[in-house]
Image: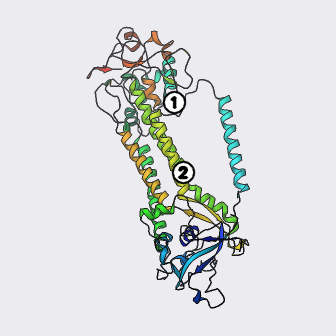
Amino acid sequence: MSSLQRLEPVECMSAYRSSLVSDRRSVLLVTSNSSAAVNGSLVDFTYRNIDATNAGQNFYGGLFDPLSWMCAFFLTYDSDTVCNADDAIKRVDSWTLFQQPIEYCLSEKVTDHCRLQWSTTIMIVVICANIMKLLAMIAALWTLPQNTLAMVGDAAASFLSHPDPTTEGACLLSRDNIVKERKGKAWSPTTKPGARNFAKSQQSHHSQHHQRWYKAPSVKRWALCVLFCVATWGTAIGLLGEGLSTLKLAGLSIDMSSLWKMGFGAVNTRALVRLNHTIWAPENSTLNFVLLANLPQLVLSLLYFTVNGLLTTMCISDEWLGFGVQRTGLRVSFPVKGSAQRSSYFLSLPYKYAIPMLIGAGLLHWLISQSIFLVKIDVFDAWGVHQRAKDITTAGYSGIALIFVLILGAVMLAALVAVGFQKLPTESGMPNAGSCSVVISAACHAPVEEIDDIALKPLMWGAVPDRGMLEHHGGLAGHCCLSSQQVTKPKAGKSYS
């Protein structure tokens, strides 16, 4: 009796309210009605344990409910009845069991059983993957040349220093022109005569029009991203509906308040993934459930790269077209010290987009880890003997965490669409390049006297003075380009080549 701890009725219910109790075992309910005893001081007893064949029975024949002894005094049990500990605690003053009033409890306090479980196979795979990643980073650091073309500024600097003759005379060439004129063919200097003749003789007429950020990525890229997001979101809604349906069939309330009380990432015997209608699985199935619990993390990572690429393209277009309204230096991978060149972003995007995106992605990863997770439960009998045959290996889920995943995902998708409706700085008439190298090349035919060190200076796009350009471009039309000298806004209706 020394290990028994006296608990008042409300303390007793609170201590055993979880369907999985690890620090307590048997409990004696003491009644104040001494005349009820038929065998010494014992009124009645029951043995509550999980049955592997039928998932257990409660007192009255329904599905397994480990808390039925708390609620039997006010519930009429049937196959759809499940005890809610909160309801029992509210009625604790009238608590009875087998028609006997409960005065207090004697609870058997035991040492909490817990242990670190890990998979050697998974650990080896993780270590090998990280070693390969480290080797790839070292190889990239030591083998790639210094003058890499990793950013739009790198390409512009290269084209300014070494003008591309393929795009000479096509200063107003835009990505839309490339798509429309060369549809079905790749742009190449060898595609003669069409591509070269177009580049040399086509004279574009400047016309002002407003464009939005969403115009920067291609329609296919937008379609891929949106379809990926909608498919993922729709799948999550389907899984949520299935999970809530299972909880409802178990007799649980599925309103927001009840789901919130179930918690984030909390193991609940009624919210476990059941394969073939059972929570028991072969001992070697741990890896399968690890993969199941982490598959959504892989999907989210792929989705992050898709959205990041889309946002990066829009930001590139905004920065590129910014040369038409403000003089600034090129953003390159390795800026020359003392020059006007700018370094690349640490997070590859402007901080006002990169930081919210990282925070949102981090929260989504955490919420997903709380939505579906690996569950391994060691089962001990009433005498503290480990029942290995009844150990549980499965995955658990949290409805409230999945709801927050859906809400945050929808908010982030809406934010991406809202960002896409920002106006691009097209008032200068500078063609939108996106990340098209042909268009970037076409804008980098500067006056000959600037070529030597132009990439190191602050640059602005616009129409350059006619002097010095007549001989170089034949004097047939005006010319627009990135220049370190004074430029003017192109005139509507005038030809530029």
Asked whether residue 39 is in view, the answer is yes
Task: Say which of 28 and 132 sits in front.
Answer: 28
Q: Secondary structure at mark 1?
A: loop
Disc 2 marks a residue whose amino acid type is: Trp
Within-10-Å neighbours for mark 1: few <14, some 14–19, many 20+: few
* Spatial separation of the CA atoms under disc 2 and disc 1: 26 Å
The C terminus lies in which quarter of the figure? Answer: top left
Evaluate if marks 2 and 1 touch, with contact meaning CB atoms under 8 Å apart. no
Seen in the picture, residue 468 relative to 362 is either above or below; the reply is above
Disc number placed over residue 476 in the picture, else none? none
Question: Image point 55% across, 71% down: which residue?
Answer: 13
Disc 1 marks a residue whose amino acid type is: Tyr
Circle 1 residue? 345
Task: Say which of 10 and 219 sits in front.
Answer: 10
Circle 2 residue? 366
Q: Is residue 287 left or right of residue 451?
A: right
Seen in the picture, residue 205 relative to 72 is either above or below; the reply is above
Spot the residue most to the left: 493
Q: Position of residue 486 (x, y in %)?
A: 37, 12
**Disc 2 or disc 1, which is closer to the eye?**
2
Q: Position of residue 336 (x, y in %)?
A: 56, 18
